[in-house]
Structure formats: C-alpha cells, structure tokens
Image (tube, helix red, strand yellow):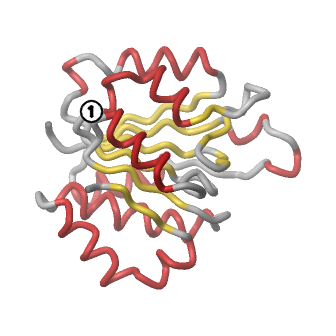
C-alpha cells in the first residue's frame, strides 16, 4: 500500500439551512500535496448511490496506493449523514457497502460525533473492516480546528510506519486540541 488520500465529502450546500456551511476539504488536500507531495482523490457525494459507486471504484488495484480514507460529513453517533438522503448511514451500513475497500487503510471520520458512544461498536467496525485504524471525533467540532488536526493526523499516518508512534506523536503535539475535539482512535 502506498501513500495517498481518498476524500469523500458531503454536498454541504443542499442540506437544511441551519446546517449549510461553506466548506470544502479540497484546499486542505492541495496543501498536503504541495507541502508533502501526497497524491489525493477528492469526490463530492450527496446520495447513497454515489457513495456505492465510488466505493466500488476504489476497490480497483489502481487505488491501492491511497492509504487514507477521509470522510468529511455531518455526523451522528456511529454514523454519517449523506446530504441527499433522509436517513443517516450507520457505520455498519457503510461497511456493508464498502466491503473490503477499507482493508489495511486508515479510516478517518472528520465529522461531528461519529465516534461518540460505545467503544465496542467502533472496535467491531475496525475489526470487520480490516482497517489499520479508525479515527474521528466524539464531539461537535469546529471545522477550522478539525482541519488543523486532520492535517497533522494525515502527515503522521503517511510518514510513520509504526501505528502506536503515530498516535503518541499526535497526543504529544496536539493533546489539547484532541481533547477539545473529542478525538478518538481505534488502532489496536
């Protein structure tokens, strides 16, 4: 597996008015590419059909070099919200759609509260997906602060080989920010 990021981001502008935000994660990814030479793929998705399509495409061997799956969505406990859908998508449903696409990859949910709740459910998602780690937030997050943390997380994931070293370094450098965001990792 190589070094790169696949970002799937919600369509922030078609949501309910109170949730509309002028966000776009692609500048963050361009920054990573310009500073560190990290390739990326960025896709905006709004519906379950679009998500299914892209996860199927990313199973192809030509995408093996992309080691990080970065989900940028509205979140809820153990789930994400696709803006074109009425019902949230649970992590179990995401796993059923994605299948082995998450195997041996870092999965990061840059969304509010997705990793809130029972750790057992997140641990099971990690085991069932075969992911190297599953990370995300347990609180409602400020998009600027989460972007700062996401950059630091991706840099560590793509530079270090030892998974425990990644999270020790992040805790040492960004422990206060992690606490504010409710950052949680499941990597062991």
Q: Position of residue 26 (x, y in %)?
A: 48, 46
Picture layout, residue 5 above or below residue 37:
above
Q: Position of residue 18 (x, y in %)?
A: 87, 51
Closer to the camera in the image, 131 or 60: 131
Relative to 7, 164 lies left or right:
left
Q: Residue at x 29, y 55 (%)?
A: 187
Closer to the camera in the image, 47 or 102: 102
Residue that protrudes farthest toward the left in the picture: 161
Badge 1: how crowded within 10 Å, few (<14), some, or many (20+)?
some
Q: Residue at x 55, y 39 (%)?
A: 9
Q: Secondary structure at mark 1?
A: loop
Relative to 108, 24 lies left or right:
right
For mark 1, what is the residue? 103
Please identify the quadrant where the C terminus is shown: bottom left
- The image quadrant that residue 173 belongs to is bottom left
Relative to 162, 172 lies left or right:
right
Picture layout, residue 24 above or below residue 175:
above
Q: Residue at x 19, y 60 (%)?
A: 163
Q: Position of residue 172 (x, y in %)?
A: 30, 84
Residue that protrudes farthest toward the right in the picture: 17
Q: Position of residue 43 (x, y in %)?
A: 49, 31
Please identify the quadrant where the N terminus is shown: top left
- The image quadrant that residue 36 belongs to is bottom left
Picture layout, residue 22 above or below residue 137:
above
Q: Residue at x 27, y 40 (%)?
A: 105
Closer to the camera in the image, 22 or 129: 129
Relative to 75, 59 lies left or right:
left
């Amino acid at each position: 597996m190589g070094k790169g990021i696949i970002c799937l981001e919600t369509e922030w502008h078609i949501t309910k008015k109170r949730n509309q935000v002028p966000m776009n994660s692609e500048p963050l990814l361009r920054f990573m590419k310009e500073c560190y030479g990290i390739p990326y793929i960025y896709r905006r998705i709004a519906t379950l059909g679009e998500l299914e399509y892209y996860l199927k495409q990313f199973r192809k061997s030509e995408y093996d070099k992309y080691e990080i799956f970065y989900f940028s969505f509205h979140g809820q406990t153990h789930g994400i919200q696709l803006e074109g859908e009425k019902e949230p998508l649970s992590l179990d449903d995401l796993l059923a759609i994605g299948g082995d696409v998450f195997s041996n990859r870092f999965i990061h949910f840059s969304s509010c509260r997705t990793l809130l709740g029972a750790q057992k459910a997140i641990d099971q998602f990690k085991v069932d997906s075969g992911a190297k780690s599953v990370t995300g937030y347990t609180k409602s997050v400020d998009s600027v602060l989460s972007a700062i943390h996401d950059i630091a997380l991706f840099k560590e994931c793509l530079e270090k080989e030892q998974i425990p070293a990644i999270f020790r370094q992040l805790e040492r450098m960004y422990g206060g920010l992690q606490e504010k965001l409710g950052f949680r990792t499941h990597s062991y």
